Amino acid sequence: MRDFKLKNQFILATYIIILSFLLLNIKTVGNVLNTTLSILKPFIIGLAIAFLLNVPMKSFENRLIGKIVKKYNIKNSKIIIRIISLILTLITIGLLLSAFINLVIPQLVKSTSSLISSIPQDIDSLQSYITTYMSHINISDNLHHSLLSGVDKMSDFMIKTLNYFISNIVGITFSITSIITNLLLGFVIAIYMLLSKDKLIVQFKKVIYGLLSENMADKIMSIIRLGDVKFSKFIVGQCTDGIVMGSLCFIGMTIFNMPYAILISTLIGITDLIPIFGTFLGAALSALILFMIKPVTALYFIIMIVIIQQVEGNFIYPFIVGNSIGLSSFWILVPIIIGSSMFGVLGILIGVPLFSMIYTLCGGYINNKIKSKNINIQK
């Protein structure tokens, strides 16, 4: 008994010493972690790409290729199913990217170039509009000058931002090259991961079951499976919601003949990938663009996007995303607020499915406790 207590005290003392060392050398530890993450970046990106590609690949395996291959009783069917499903996944994503590059990108480049070239003219038009409007209403000169000053500051900010990008074009090019290199390496790693998925899973299970008790290992594997389901459903649901929101915005802008429909709809669709608040972010940026061209158009756009957002937030989002991850609109707000305050956009994207996991695990634990006590909470 005494030996057991001494052992526990020794372990506790060891933990305290290690923790104290880490806290006292927090800057050095941070630098080591940054260097390690930088080296492992292609593998982290590869893991993320593999997870994303695994979602459509599983659909091909279970719903199409698997049924066809098993029907004809082909040897080594598992390997064949995996290879064909991966090829079909890559072809599908390649076709979607090709369509996006050929149909949307040229319009985005055209709209962006037109927007940048027209900034000085739009600023002058906005100033003229404000001056004309102010001359027809009873308003103080101070407020009038404040509005014009605000427009000048906005113009200076946008011009300075453009000049910054132009002057730092070399650094930006190197950064983009580095990102592309890491993405390509990550893509290659992802392909190897997907082809060796079953083998890697077995190796991981060996480590877990070899180092931990069977009961603890079972619990960890159960949590990992739950995480796979939650994150997969969240990704599919969020992407679907972004496409729907961008499409509704494009249809609305086309009907009302608003400028830069493709550019703004793409912006709305991309920002909508951020749950709940993404639409407002995209709408604010889009309204700013339209306001520079014609303030009345910006007002109409805001009214339109509010109506679309209400439909999307109350009917589409809860149905597509909320049901898929098992969270109501209220509970989705919790990880968004906490995640955004701690890790920004990444915290939001990871926080929602992670919170869904915790919610499911806690719910199951509490329900089992209530069931074991034979309590009827409905009475």
Image (cartoon, helix red, strand yellow):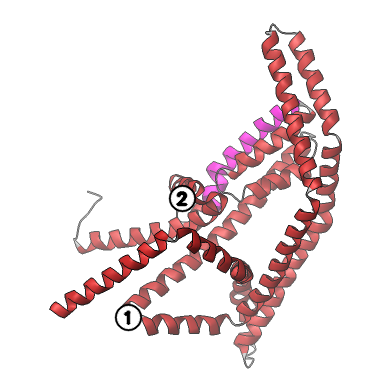
Indicate the position of residue 116 as horizontal and vertical percent values: 83, 39
For the N terminus, the image quarter is: bottom left
Determine whether the residue tagged by mark 1 lies in a helix, strand or loop. loop
- Give amino acid for label 1: Ser
Q: Quadrant of residue 154?
A: top right
Please say whether residue 350 is one of the residues in the magenta stretch.
Answer: no
Secondary structure predominantly adopted by residues drawn in magenta: helix
Specify start and end residues of the magenta stretch as a single range: 295-321
Please say whether residue 300 is one of the residues in the magenta stretch.
Answer: yes
Return the residue found at the far left: 1
**Can the viewer see residue 32 in this picture?**
yes
| Residue ID at (41%, 80%) | 208
Q: Which residue is mark 2?
A: 335
In the picture shown, does residue 372 fall above or below 164? below
| Residue ID at (65%, 89%) | 72
* Nearest to N terminus: mark 2 or mark 1: 1
Count of numbered circles on the image: 2
| Residue ID at (25%, 74%) | 10
- Mark 2 to mark 1 CA distance (whole Å): 32 Å
In the picture shown, does residue 91 fall above or below 124? below
Q: Which residue is mark 1?
A: 213
Residue closer to the observer: 145 or 366: 145
